[in-house]
Image (cartoon, helix red, strand yellow):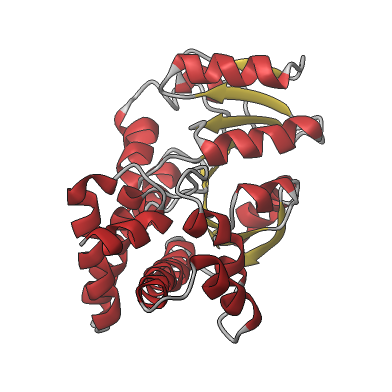
């Protein structure tokens, strides 16, 4: 592999764009593609680097690349782009390593591992834990699984925007761990919303309640960095309600497949489904508080 690799990033939403910014700043050569060409062009203009170029197709982005980072919203899109579109990988280098950084689900990860292996390409299942701020501060956690050699080869690239690449075993194990982490994230989000709804209904101001959260035993990093989102409905959207619902579906399906009862998660899944149906789908997960207050 080249000492200065060429990297394709497929999917330029919040996470993909943030990663592109960090890799561009590190001098990495980038070939970018998004399903919306306007989004790609806008990011390339913003980065304004001779090492970054926009591509019209996923196949063009992958042509000549040493690594591919996929950051799509769900596994169905990832699989469709990489596998179902026959043109995407037709010019891929034989030593290409594809990493999926999204929450795609265990079945998709295992399927991609098999299908890419059949094309003699490497695959790393590499979902991440963190936020846009943790990408910028290089504090993202990568939960990697797949062939150990492929993980070791791509790890230096991933460490340009993360603090650790944790190796978890065969492909799919990264997705299992990411879903286990998100189980806590999403139930904690619902618990904070219910707690604030209860406290404010009882006469405590939201700010005072959150001050107590910050000083109490529940002051987890998630609780701290979601403060603005809970207290300011106009705060930027970090994770949408419909994305949370997608994750919770993957989590409960995994629990069912493994025979693990997930009663709390099922209840949270129902709550987010109600919020989504009530028009909160595109709003931040913290707006579950507003949904509860209006119910």
Percent position of residue 219, x then y: 60, 77
Percent position of residue 197, x then y: 36, 71
| Left or right relative to 182: residue 49 | right
Q: Nearer the viewer, residue 172 or 181?
A: 181
Percent position of residue 113, x then y: 42, 51
Q: Is residue 84 above or below residue 75?
A: above
| Left or right relative to 195: residue 67 | right
The residue most toward the front is: 203
Q: Is residue 160 above or below residue 24?
A: below
Which quadrant would the C terminus be assigned to in this image? bottom left
Instruction: Tell me if I can see residue 249 in this picture.
Output: no
| Left or right relative to 171: residue 50 | right
Q: Is residue 200 above or below residue 52?
A: below
Q: Is residue 39 above or below residue 80?
A: above
Count of marks, rendered view:
0
Instruction: Tell me if I can see residue 68 in this picture.
Output: yes
Q: Quadrant of residue 20?
A: top right
């Amino acid at each position: 592999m080249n000492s200065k690799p060429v990297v394709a990033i497929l999917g330029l939403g919040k996470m993909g764009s943030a990663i592109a910014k960090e890799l561009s700043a590190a001098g990495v050569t980038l070939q970018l593609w998004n399903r919306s060409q306007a989004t790609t062009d806008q990011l390339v203009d913003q980065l304004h680097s001779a090492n970054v170029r926009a591509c019209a197709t996923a196949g063009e982005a992958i042509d000549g690349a040493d690594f591919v980072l996929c950051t799509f919203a769900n596994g169905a899109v990832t699989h469709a782009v990489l596998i179902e579109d026959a043109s995407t990988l037709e010019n891929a280098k034989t030593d290409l390593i594809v990493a999926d950084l999204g929450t795609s689900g265990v079945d998709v990860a295992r399927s991609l591992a098999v299908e890419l292996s059949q094309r003699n390409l490497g695959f790393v299942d590499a979902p991440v834990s963190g936020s846009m701020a943790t990408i910028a501060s290089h504090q993202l956690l990568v939960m990697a699984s797949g062939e150990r050699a492929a993980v070791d080869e791509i790890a230096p690239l991933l460490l340009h925007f993360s603090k650790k690449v944790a190796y978890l075993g065969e492909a799919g194990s990264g997705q299992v761990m990411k879903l286990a982490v998100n189980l806590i994230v999403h139930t904690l989000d619902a618990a904070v919303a219910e707690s604030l709804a209860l406290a404010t209904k009882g006469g405590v101001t939201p700010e005072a309640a959150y001050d107590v959260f910050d000083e109490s035993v529940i002051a987890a990093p998630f609780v701290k960095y979601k403060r603005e989102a809970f207290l300011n409905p106009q705060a930027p959207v970090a994770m949408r309600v419909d994305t949370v619902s997608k994750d919770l579906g993957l989590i409960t399906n995994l629990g069912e497949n493994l025979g693990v009862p997930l009663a709390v998660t099922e209840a949270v899944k129902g709550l987010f489904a109600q919020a989504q149906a009530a028009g909160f789908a595109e709003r931040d997960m913290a707006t579950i508080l507003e949904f509860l207050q209006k119910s």
